[in-house]
Each structure stands twice: as C-alpha cells, then as structure tokens.
Amino acid sequence: MSANGDVKVLVKEKIGESGVELLRRHFDVDLGTDWDDQELADRIGEYDGILIRSATKMTADLIEKAGRLRVIGRAGVGVDNVDVPAATERGIIVANAPESNVVTAAEHTMALLLALARNIPQAHASLTAGKWERSKFSGVEVYDKTLGIIGFGRIGQLVAHRAKGFGMKVLAFDPFVSAERYRELGIEKADGPDDIYAQADFITIHLPKTPETANFLNADAFSKMRDGVRVLNVARGGLIDEAALKDALDSGKVAGAAIDVFPSEPVTEHPLFGYGNVVVTPHLGASTAEATDRAGYQSAEQVVAALTGGVVSTAVNIPSVGAEDMEVLGPFLPLATQLGRLAMGLAEGSSIERIEAAFMGKIAEFDTRLLTLAVIRGALQGRSEQEVNLVNAPTIAQQRGIVVEEKTVSEAQDFNELIRVTVLAGDQRVAVAGTGIGPSQVPHLVEVQGRRLTVELAPFVTVFRYADLPGMIGRVGTIFGGHGINISSAAVGHAPDGAAEGGDEGSRRLAAMVVTTDVAVPADVVQEIVASEGFVGGWSIVLDDR
C-alpha cells in the first residue's frame, strides 16, 4: 500500500522500472502505456499526476479535462509536447529531467572523438567487407593533443574532465562561465573562439541553438583553424555550416569530422555521408539505456516532490507564489528578465563572475526571490545548452561559477519601485536599472551605466556609448534609415555633472543612447556606427525569447 493511497499517478509511457517503483512507494500508480488518445482523455480526470515521455501530447484541451492534475512529469529534456502556459494557468507544475542525458552526451562526444582519431568505423566497414587495409586506417593519438571546447556548460565540462583522463590538453571558451570555475576544474580559459581555432587539434562545440549561434563554425572560423584539425558536433544541428565544412574537408584544411546532429532530422541522405574521413551517428547523444532509466527516475522524483510538498527543482513553469505577493511582483517579472538580458548583453568581459540584483522601493517589502530568478533567467537564457527557467536558473549559474547576490532597499530615489541589475565580467562592471510605469507597470529602462534616461523596453534594443557631442543621434538615424531599419523610440543619458571617462577615452564625457527598433539591428550596422568618429561601443540586444 502506498503512503498516499488516495493520490493517483498515471505513467502514460514506458519508463525504467526504477521510476515506476519510486512512484509506487508513494502513490496509487496506473500504467497506461497501451491507452489510446480517447481513453487518456476519458480517464485523465482521475489522476493527480502524470508521467510522460515525448509521444503523449498534453494539449490545452486535455489539460482542461484533468480536473485533479497537479503535476506533469516529462521523462526527458524537452517539453514541446506539453502546453506549458495552459498548465501554468491551471496551477499544474511541469517538470522535466534536464540532467538525465548530460553524462551520455559527454561520453558519446568522447566516443566520436576516439573513433575519429583512429578511423574505427571506416576500418570496421573495410574489414567486414573482406579487406585487410591496416596501413590505410592508421590514425593519430589523442594524448598530448589540444582539445578546444566551445561552450563550457555542464556537458562541456564533463567532456573536459574525460579528455583530461586521456592526457589531452583542454582549452575552453564560454563568456558566460566565471574564471573561477575554470580554475576549479583545472581547465585553461580561452580568450575567444579565435584562440581555440589557433591552438586546437580537435574542436567540439557544445552551444545552445540560437540565432546567434547558428552556423557558428563557418567558413571564416575554418580558415582560422590549424591545418588538419578535426571537428565534432554532438550538441545541436545547425551549429556547423555544413557547406563550409564540406569545402574545408575537400581542401584538406579539416582532416576529419564527427557529427551526431543535423539541421533537419531524420536524415538518410547527406553530402558528407560518403566521406571516408567523416563519422556520423543518428542523434545518439542521449540514447543509452542508463539515460532512459535516469530520465524516468528523475522525473518520478519530481512528481513525488510536487505531490508531497517537496521542492520541485526542475519545474519549467513559474514556481508557486502567494497571491498577495504575486499581485505586486507579477508585473515586474518581465522587467527583471529584460534587465538581466540587457545587462548580460552589455557585459564586455570574457567571463561573467557575478550578477547583482537590487530591488528598491515598495517591491523590497515583498519576497523578491522570484524577481531574482527572473533576472538570472534573463541573463543566462540562450547562453546555456539547456532551457533556462525560473527554477533551474540558480543551478545553471552555480554550475558556471557565477555568484548571484540579491539586495533590497526600502527607498528608491525618484521612483516608487526600481530594479537595478549589475553584471561583473572580468574588470568590467555593467549596470542597468528599470521601473514599471502606468497602471500596467509597463517596463521602462531608466539608467544605463550611471546615465539617466527613460525609454520603454521593447524586443529589439540597441545601446551606444559615445562622446557627448551634438549630432550623434542624427548620425545613428541616418545610418539606420539607409539600412531600412525603423526606429521606434530613442533616449539619451548624459554623464552626471563632473563625471568623465578615463582610460583610452581620456577625459571625454561619454553619453549613452538607447534605441528601440522594429527589427533586430545586424552586427555589421552597429559596427558601421561604432567605427565612425566619437563612438566608443555599440550593442544590439534581443530582449524576448525568439
């Protein structure tokens, strides 16, 4: 008999037996792996929790029928098959198992690296075809070779640890991992991707897939790599420009490649499949019996926590907040997220050391931890190989060695409420502040690097720092117009009286200009403006989740 016999959980898809047994120790469990969609719709109202994998579609209509449901457990990483907003609206926790495949992905990376170095699949195919071509498949040692890791999140760090076990030198780059974390792991921190291209014998990429990382390894990147480099992608399809990779393989610049993921899957015909120096696998990075069992067990743990009052550490939707606090704090969640993303986008350092979130005025009287989570989520979203949400954000920051500090101050000069986010990156300190204006608390930016201004935040924001001289706004408008970019709003913040910038800019007073547009401003347009006289820096930042 379970400890909570009146609590019912449905295991809708096949998971490891360890996960099922864990649930049975706590609840009355039914297995519905053979149910069709109609039976699920007819019976889902009986259950307090459901555990699924990728095949079951938890639509808004199905969730509407689940009158008792309190938690949806997803045995895996993605939750694309769950209508998370619909679940959130009904107060249903959605939890996944984001750490279930990290070891498997790291091991598959090493398996492909070794196969690539020693021509294992090619030699196997040759021998089983009746040929003995020992000299043809002579490989290279990985010992004392340099492995460059682009993207140093959880999986990248596990790959580094394993590569060191093979005696490899490891060089890693990720601007959103603290220098202290590199030191803890004994890994050399690259100053940038070019540093890795110049030194690495093997390069493996472990970045999230975003518009900024699409085709990250392109023709320009390959041209900067060492002759005879070998590259791997066991992360996301589309991180490597496959046409550029083909050209680099044809020219001999790249000696070999190992690919587990593709822009479109499934794929059985590909220009690189016939190459003798290319190793491919059909997206096996997360495919092991252990990973499947681990995903089931971890998601079962989350279901148990949700139904017994425990902490649901992998929830992908908003944590529960008291109605009174949520009434005040809710409107500030978008502002906190946007300020986190903006501050991180403006940070120039090669490594992020610290994020400070300060809450001033009326909101300081409430539990602001939720707002701090929103700041971290905004800062790290799109910069981690896994989706960042309000629950896993602190863990992802901790894994990357980023210290997070929250401060509350009862008064906010000139404002009823103010949120200030500061990011410390190397020797750079970037600070932005914002508030909500009007009955709906519409997010507005009111401070950038000590410069006061007021502009409504929008999805596409561009920030410039420049010498405080006449005509600079007009120059930006002219160049934007020449590229067909429409300006929605603009604001300028001047240096406080008596303040001046030192360093390379001497004693010039620098102003800050914030421009919102109807489309994202391309990097080359920003650089065109920054290259003109008087401009010191420019940043184009997308503040929404696209």
Image (cartoon, rainbow, N blue to C red):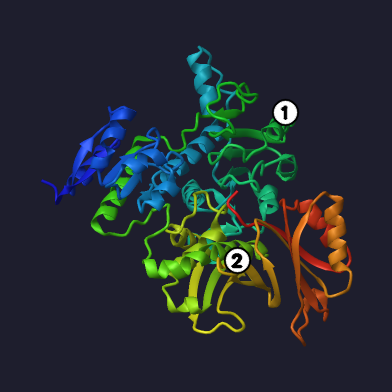
Question: What amino acid type should be assigned to the residue bearing mark 2?
Answer: Pro
Mark nearest the camera among 1 and 2 is: 2
Q: Residue at 54% of width from left, 48% of height from top?
A: 168
Q: Residue at 25% of width from left, 53% of height from top?
A: 307
Kindly give the residue lying farthest to the left in the view shown.
1
- Whether 282 is drawn above or below 398: the answer is above
In the figure, is residue 308 to the left or right of 225?
left
Q: Badge 1, how many Cα within 10 Å: few under 14, some, many 20+? A: few
In the picture, residue 347 is in which quadrant? bottom right
- Whether 340 is drawn above or below 161: the answer is below
Q: Are marks 1 and 2 in contact (CB under 8 Å)?
A: no
- Distance from the alpha carbon under mark 1 to that under mark 2: 52 Å
Out of 325 and 259, give the one closest to the viewer: 325
User: Of helix, strand and loop, which one carries label 2?
Assistant: strand
In the picture, residue 465 is in which quadrant? bottom right
Q: Position of residue 312 (x, y in %)?
A: 34, 56
Of the numbered discs in the image, which one, if any, rests on residue 250?
Answer: 1
Out of 97 and 112, give the one closest to the viewer: 97
Reading the chain from its start, which is encountered first: label 1 or label 2?
Answer: 1
Q: Can I make out residue 387 in this image?
A: yes
Question: What amino acid type should be assigned to the residue bearing mark 1?
Answer: Asp
